[in-house]
Image (cartoon, grey):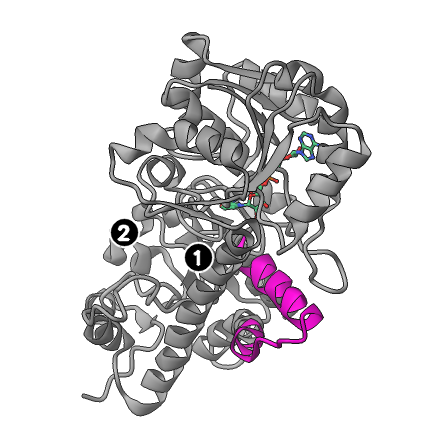
Amino acid sequence: MRIAMIGTGYVGLVSGACFADFGHDVTCVDKDAGKIDAINRGVMPIWEPGLEALVKANADRGRLAFTTDIKDGVKDAEAVFIAVGTPARRGDGHADLSFVFAAVRELAKALQGPAVIVTKSTVPVGTGDEIARILAEEGAPEGTSVASNPEFLREGAAIADFKHPDRIVVGTDDDHAREVLREIYRPLFLNKAPILFTGRRTAELTKYAANAFLAVKISFINEIADLCEAVGADVQEVARGIGLDNRIGPKFLHPGPGYGGSCFPKDTLALLQTANEAGVPQRIVNTVVKVNDDRKASMAGRVTSALGGSVKGKRIGVLGLAFKPNTDDMRDAASIPLIQSLTEDGADVIAFDPAAMDNAKGMIDGLACANDAYAVANGADALVIVTEWDEFRALDLDKLAATMRGKALIDLRNVYDPEEAEKAGLDYRGIGRGRAR
Ligand code: NAD
């Protein structure tokens, strides 16, 4: 199958490389010439485990190419995936579809023959209809169809997720489009991945409903964690106790500093916009958005209270900047409001992240970074674990405590056993770990 991928970011690059690995002939297109040049030199624009080797292996076999020239990219393509960004529009939270529509217009002119246009970007209900309208308006070849195929991969585990998805959702009423997508994903049927064929609008909404539900789950356990602190219960054990119930499930019950990343914040806002326009307000999701915003804003207060009410002149070490481990993605990361707030209150913040420091420096003015966790701890009054990278899970707590000036360890991911941390002389504060038993 000959496939073109428009947009070579987290989703486009991973999807393109995986499709090539299935044996398809893939060309990834991006308008960012720097990105395409770097990839063609073997330098990945994103930090994603296993990606560099996968791209190289498939490029070497001649199945994966990269270009800035859309005409070249879509030549002879049977399917063209759109994987450009759909950030939240400033002001109202509606998904900004300008990148999608611009790509569709360019695409309509570049196509030499009919193709199945597949939206992989997360787009609001009805976007497929608008894409079909634009294609017709711009004179796309007769027989061109539009399908929705939302992507559910997680950054940090993107390749494994793409190759072993829980499900593949395809929304289209067009028989040919359905067969082309079935053929593209056929290698995954061997892994028994269920493929759900449905209408285009249903597929579009499924993606938002999935992300909103996960956001609800995270916010739910975060509020239960606060209650645990107030009443002397341990949220880790509550989460295990409820998660073992098959109806609930153990995933997404990890309390923390609030969800971030490139998807949940913007997708919950976009769902609320769709719901309001449809006159069907989503009160649960609406509340979750507020709960999460408040939570992120409140994390600096935990550090302040651990330091006795003021951070002025205090040195605070931050471990982890990315919104989650195994990625360099800083979009809407909880570290951003935390560090900004502490800095505004007069703290001297120093941070370390294994992959996200370069991106973070572009988003947090004046961010000071160190080379590893121990350098961050050196002379710190407080240490805050923000992202649960593996390398922060087995730090030598005695060594940390010895180099710190103060003793506060604020563990926003509950990585450490409170008793072990206290044994090392640290004043440990996790999330939702009330003590009275
Ligand atoms: P990204 O910002 O990493 O990549 C988007 C790329 O598209 C950029 O490289 C940009 O230069 C390129 N682009 C924009 N307009 C273009 C055009 N006209 N022609 C060619 N290239 C163009 O974005 P992402 O994180 O990969 O997300 C893409 C979409 O996938 C979004 O809708 C997002 O919601 C969705 N999604 C993301 C994830 C994730 O974990 N990142 C997971 C599932 C779904």
Q: Is residue 268 magenta?
A: yes
Residue 65, by quadrant, is: top right
Q: Residue at x 34, y 71 (%)?
A: 430
Residue type at numbered disc 2: Leu
Residue type at numbered disc 1: Gly
Quadrant of the rendering where the C terminus is positioned? bottom left
| Residue highlighted by disc 2 | 395
Badge 2 crowding class, 10 Å Cα cut-off, few under 14, some 14 to 19, many 20 or more, is: few
Q: Is residue 377 visible?
A: yes
| Residue highlighted by disc 1 | 379
Q: Residue at x 49, y 64 (%)?
A: 212
Residue 58: percent from left, percent from top: 41, 15
Q: Under tag 1, what secondary structure?
A: loop
In front: 162, or 146? Answer: 146
Q: Is residue 381 visible?
A: no
In front: 154, or 332? Answer: 154
Residue 324: percent from left, percent from top: 43, 52
Residue 222: percent from left, percent from top: 40, 74
Mark 1 against mark 2, which lies toward the viewer?
A: 2
Query: Mark 2 or mark 1, which is nearer the start of the sequence?
Result: 1
Q: Residue at x 51, y 31 (%)?
A: 176
In front: 285, or 24? Answer: 24
Q: Is residue 213 left or right of residue 398?
A: right
| Residue extending furthest toward the bottom | 231
- Circles 1 and 2, Cβ within 8 Å, touching? The answer is no
Question: Up-down: is 80 above or below 223?
Answer: above
Q: Is residue 2 magenta?
A: no
Q: Is residue 337 left or right of residue 235?
A: right
The part of the chain drawn in magenta is 263-291
Question: Up-down: is 383 above or below 120?
Answer: below
In front: 367, or 87? Answer: 87
Residue 421: percent from left, percent from top: 25, 66
